[in-house]
Image (spheres, grey):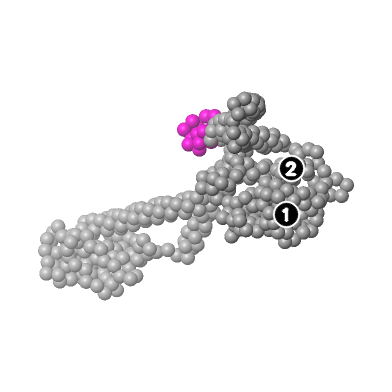
């Protein structure tokens, strides 16, 4: 955008400069031509009023003497021709022969040019001899009237001015687009916060000053944009805060009724002798709802933590073994360890267990082949050969109940696994990434444990 503005400004500036230069050069030529015409008129008037117009026969010496007496130094660069109606030359100054061109008697004003000279001629009838034509002209250098005559000094001056204009235009565009660059960076932060289901950041100081009311800026479009954006961010944060509070409250309110429903159902099933299969199905659904609510509340409590507590130094290998044993009971021998070098992690053991459980469960749940895991030098990696995480799920990573609309119904899951993973990694500031290439590879890097910590 900045480059586009720069080039547009530059083109407008060049077009304006060329237009102004054209107008000035045209005015310059017109004024000089007018100056020449005035000189010719004054000279013609002086000649007509002199004795030259009274001579019946012309002697060159006598005619030159009359012209010199009448005009003096003003005769330099001018020429005079007296012709008959038939075009016969009765008198002519010597400098006309240097032109080597024929000067016609019509029209009244004539312009002639050569590569080196510019000639302007006025044709007049002599008052006392109507059959004779007086031609008064002026010879000047072609550069006197030319629009294209530019010397080296002028070219260097124009080049210097253009360079200065280019520099000023570039810095002007940088100054004008600096707030827009800051706005783009801020909007990028807002987008990332929305994707992470986090509170939106406030306006940076560089933009806040544009949101303040100032005289003569009530119609400033950028100021209005910043004010609207600031108001929108505040409303989103307030709505998010209330929505989060309402959601947590609703989840808490559901736990007690679910417990009561489960107890009452047991009483009713015993009283009315409900068959065991129906009892098992109902209790399974109640347990699933209760588990979903409990998992959501546990995750919600984790999101409110700013600093992790109950930290211990644990060995990744010793902690991973019991997790793999439990998963083996459900998914069999599908987990393959490709590289194993033990290292230590500083964390709340419960959080590390939740991270490992969710990552490995997702890999096993959404793939049918082997799942490879490796850990060494502070890095833990899980790779499966499934269909990969859908783009719409990956774009909303961190949000609860984040499941693809195309997920197979038989695949169990409530969509909290990735939310757990992201929330735990963000809490400890562990670096993580998902790589989609012939399946899904998840990698998390743990900071080294400092001795004595």
The mark total stands at 2
- 21 relative to 183, above or below: below
Instruction: Kindly identify which numbered label has been placed on residue 435.
Output: none
Q: Residue at x 52, y 29 (%)?
A: 215
Quadrant including the C terminus: top right
Q: Is residue 329 left or right of residue 240?
A: right
The local crowd at label 2, few if under 14, some if 14 to 19, many if 20 or more residues have their Cα within 10 Å, is many
SS of the residue at dot 1?
strand
Camera-side residue of 164 and 138: 164
Bounds of the magenta segment: 212-228
Alpha carbon distance from label 1 to label 2: 15 Å
For the question of whether residue 17 can be seen, the reply is: no
Camera-side residue of 418 and 155: 418
Q: Is residue 423 left or right of residue 239?
A: right
SS of the residue at dot 2?
helix
The local crowd at label 1, few if under 14, some if 14 to 19, many if 20 or more residues have their Cα within 10 Å, is some
Instruction: Kindly identify which numbered label has been placed on residue 380.
Output: 1
- In the rendered image, residue 34, in percent from the top left (x then y), is placed at 30, 54
Q: Is residue 219 left or right of residue 284?
A: left
Quadrant in the rendering for residue 14 = bottom left
Quadrant in the rendering for residue 347 = top right
- In the rendered image, residue 96, in percent from the top left (x then y), is placed at 27, 71
Q: Residue at x 82, y 48 (%)?
A: 314
- In the rendered image, residue 112, in percent from the top left (x then y), is placed at 26, 66
Q: Which residue is mark 2?
A: 351
């Amino acid at each position: 955008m900045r480059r586009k503005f720069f080039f547009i400004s530059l083109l407008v500036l060049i077009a304006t400069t060329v237009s102004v230069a054209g107008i000035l050069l045209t005015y310059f030529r017109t004024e000089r031509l007018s100056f020449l015409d005035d000189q010719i008129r004054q000279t013609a008037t002086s000649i007509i009023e002199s004795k030259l117009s009274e001579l019946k026969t012309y002697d060159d010496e006598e005619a030159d003497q009359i012209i010199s007496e009448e005009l003096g130094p003003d005769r330099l660069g001018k020429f005079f021709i007296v012709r008959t109606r038939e075009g016969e030359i009765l008198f002519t100054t010597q400098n006309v022969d240097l032109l080597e061109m024929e000067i016609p008697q019509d029209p009244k004003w004539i312009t002639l040019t050569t590569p080196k000279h510019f000639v302007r001629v006025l044709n007049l009838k002599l008052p006392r001899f109507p059959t004779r034509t007086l031609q008064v002209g002026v010879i000047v250098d072609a550069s006197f009237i030319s629009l294209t005559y530019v010397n080296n000094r002028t070219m260097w001056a124009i080049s210097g001015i253009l360079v200065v204009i280019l520099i000023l235009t570039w810095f002007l565009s940088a100054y004008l687009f600096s707030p827009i660059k800051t706005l783009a960076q801020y909007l990028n932060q807002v987008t990332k916060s929305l994707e992470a289901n986090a509170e939106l950041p406030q306006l940076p100081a560089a933009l806040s000053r544009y949101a303040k009311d100032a005289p003569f800026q009530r119609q400033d479009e950028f100021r209005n944009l910043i004010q609207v954006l600031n108001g929108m961010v505040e409303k989103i944060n307030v709505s998010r805060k209330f929505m989060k509070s309402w959601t947590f409250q609703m989840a808490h309110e559901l736990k007690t009724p679910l417990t009561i429903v489960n107890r009452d159902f047991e009483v009713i099933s015993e009283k009315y002798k409900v068959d065991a299969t129906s009892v098992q199905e109902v209790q399974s659904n109640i347990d699933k709802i209760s588990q979903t609510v409990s998992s959501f509340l546990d995750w919600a409590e984790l999101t409110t933590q700013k600093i992790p507590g109950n930290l211990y130094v644990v060995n990744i290998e010793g902690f991973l073994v019991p997790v793999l044993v439990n998963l083996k009971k459900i998914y069999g021998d599908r987990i393959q360890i490709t590289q194993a070098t033990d290292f230590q992690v500083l964390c709340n053991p419960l959080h590390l267990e939740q991270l490992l459980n969710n990552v490995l469960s997702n890999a096993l749940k959404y793939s049918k082949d082997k799942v490879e895991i490796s850990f060494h030098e502070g890095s833990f990696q899980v790779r499966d050969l499934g269909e990969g995480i859908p783009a719409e799920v990956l774009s909303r990573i961190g949000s609860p109940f984040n499941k693809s609309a195309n997920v197979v119904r038989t695949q169990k899951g409530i969509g909290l696994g990735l939310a757990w993973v992201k929330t735990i990694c963000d809490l400890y500031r562990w670096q993580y990434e998902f790589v989609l290439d012939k399946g899904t590879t998840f990698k998390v890097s743990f900071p080294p444990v400092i001795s004595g910590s």
